[in-house]
């Protein structure tokens, strides 16, 4: 919702469909408080809280959703959001998301395809088969019609599907509200959940992180909220990096500081958002490109092309790092 908080005139109600993951819940609790500080009303819904929680959530949200002139959603791939859209179709819909999946969402919507996250395999599992009718109907509800407008609010480079308006998120609210940050002398690494989503091999990922830390003199590793505790423990032991579990999105953490003069990231949303959030601070952002041999056999066939697209479309001021094999065979050099 960055950039949309400043100057918002109530009433505006933010509904949080709380996840079960503790790290995601913690970040959302902090963001909910920031929204309240901006004068917004926040409803915390335990939609995933066990038997009966979904039905209770639908019942409690029915009236405000039916009466809402505009509905703003954060994740069009969420099954819960898709279910709500099939029941309560708004006249004006805005998708607010700076996650890399937004690029895939816009492309799939434009091609009229079913909505599938980029790292998913092509075949449908039992759960997906059951939910396929909901997903199909939700895709139609996410498309513009004569009686419905659709907008995408994002900082990512997306091509607007026919009839969809794309509004750029410039991170003006973040820059106006926080910082400028104090800069440390070294570098910081930004973690990714590519191992957890089955895209990159865990051993290879650990070796790359170790080499990146040595090459750039990094001292901290900012963990993605979905990274496993086991993997983070291994990184801390093998690399000596201080693993940081941010309690706010990294854009806010970096803007508040302290932050390294160089931030190195794997292909992810931060190679698009951090240059905006840190504009004028002197911080250099770099992205390490994913080579085909890094991918697991179980990775989605679309993974390599999608990750290359994320890195290739990063802001022009972002450095692009490539890894090449060196001697010994398992050592990487970056250039």
Image (cartoon, rainbow, N blue to C red):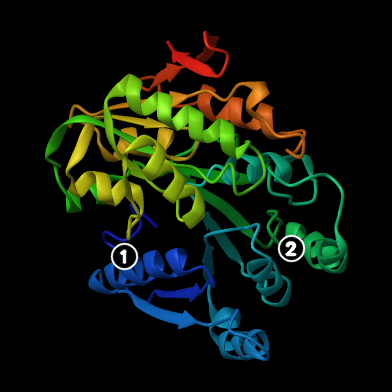
User: Is residue 163 among what the camera can see?
Assistant: no
Q: Residue at x 58, y 80 (%)?
A: 47
Q: Relative to residue 188, is residue 108 drawn left or right?
A: right
**In what quadrant of the picture does the C terminus appear?**
top left
The image shows residue 71 at horizontal and vertical percentages of 54, 68
Which image quadrant is residue 112 in?
A: top right
Which residue carries the number 2 mark?
Answer: 138
The relative height of residue 259 versus residue 280 in the rendered view (above or below) is below
Q: Quadrant of residue 168?
A: top left
Residue at the spot 60% in from the left edge and 49% down from the top edge = 196
Residues at marks 1 and 2, CA–CA distance in whole angstroms: 28 Å
Examine the rendered structure and indicate whether residue 164 appears above or below residue 96.
above
Q: Secondary structure beneath disc 2?
A: helix
**Where does residue 267 sit, x and y in percent of width and height?**
51, 32
Residue with the mark numbered 1: 8
Callout 1–callout 2 Cβ contact below 8 Å: no
């Amino acid at each position: 919702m960055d950039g949309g908080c400043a100057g918002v005139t109530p009433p505006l109600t933010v509904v949080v469909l709380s996840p079960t993951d503790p790290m995601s819940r913690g970040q959302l609790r902090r963001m909910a408080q920031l929204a309240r500080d901006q004068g917004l009303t926040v409803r915390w819904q335990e939609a995933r809280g066990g038997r009966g929680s979904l039905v209770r959530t639908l019942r409690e949200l029915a009236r405000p959703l039916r009466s809402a002139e505009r509905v703003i959603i954060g994740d069009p791939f969420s099954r819960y959001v898709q279910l709500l859209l099939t029941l309560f179709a708004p006249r004006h819909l805005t998708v607010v998301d700076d996650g890399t999946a937004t690029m895939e969402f816009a492309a799939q919507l434009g091609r009229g395809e079913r909505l599938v996250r980029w790292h998913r395999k092509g075949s449908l599992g039992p759960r997906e088969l059951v939910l396929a009718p909901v997903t199909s109907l939700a895709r139609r509800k996410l498309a513009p019609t004569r009686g419905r407008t659709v907008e995408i609010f994002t900082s990512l480079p997306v091509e607007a599907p026919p009839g969809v308006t794309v509004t750029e998120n410039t991170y003006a609210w973040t820059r106006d509200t926080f910082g400028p940050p104090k800069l440390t002398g070294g570098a910081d690494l930004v973690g990714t959940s590519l191992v957890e989503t089955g895209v990159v091999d865990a051993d290879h990922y650990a070796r790359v992180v170790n080499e990146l830390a040595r090459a750039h003199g990094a001292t901290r590793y900012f963990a993605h909220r979905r990274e496993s505790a086991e993997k983070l423990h291994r990184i801390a032991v093998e690399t000596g990096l201080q693993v940081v579990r941010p309690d706010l999105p990294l854009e806010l953490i970096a803007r508040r500081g302290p932050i390294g003069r160089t931030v190195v990231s794997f292909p992810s949303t931060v190679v698009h958002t951090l240059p905006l959030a840190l504009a004028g601070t002197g911080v250099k952002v770099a992205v390490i490109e994913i080579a085909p041999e890094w991918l697991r056999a179980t990775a989605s066939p679309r993974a390599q092309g999608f990750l290359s697209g994320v890195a290739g479309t990063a802001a022009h001021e972002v450095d692009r790092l490539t890894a090449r094999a060196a001697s010994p065979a398992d050592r990487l050099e970056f250039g």
